[in-house]
Image: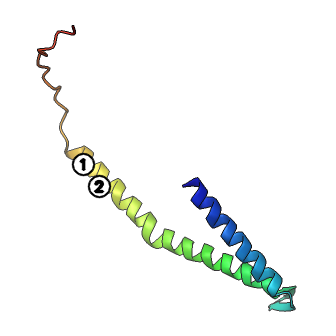
Amino acid sequence: MKVFRLLILLAVLVGGLVVGSLNSQPIEISLAFWVLKTTSGLAIIASLLLGALVGGGLVMASLVVPMYAKLRRANKAALATTTEPVAPVQTPSPFDGR
């Protein structure tokens, strides 16, 4: 599994280098009160990263956090309904250890 993760990491790194090197035209991004001067490759990579972070945050907020809350409630309800555990009855083993 570690080798697979390393290969994925290297593939993403090479993809970013290719996108950055093939898109080296300077651009200006106007953001209301200031202008950001960068290359188009860096702008593409930054926007992809920002989109992945925003998407992951939305998934966390809309799916994962409510599921954890539901799981906590279910665990609390299961603990409240269980009775004290009964000690298991030990039967003597026919094997005497020899």
Give the CA separation, mark 2 to mark 1.
Answer: 6 Å
- Is there CB contact under 8 Å for labels 2 and 1? yes
Name which residue type carries label 2: Ala
Q: Quadrant of the C terminus?
A: top left
Q: Which residue is drawn at 40% across and 66% down?
A: 66
Eyeballing the image, is 31 above or below 46? below
Q: Which label sits on residue 66?
A: none
- Quadrant housing residue 91: top left
At 67% from the left edge and 76% from the top edge, which residue is drawn? 49
Q: How crowded is mark 2: few (under 14 residues within 10 Å), some or many (20 or more)?
A: few
Query: Residue 74: horizontal and vertical position, in percent?
Result: 29, 55
Determine the residue positioned at 85% across, 87% down. 24
Q: Quadrant of the N terminus?
A: bottom right
| Disc 1 residue type (three-letter) | Ala
Tag shown at residue 78 = 1
Mark 1 packing: few (<14 Cα in 10 Å), some, or many (20+)? few
Q: Mark 2 points at which residue?
A: 74
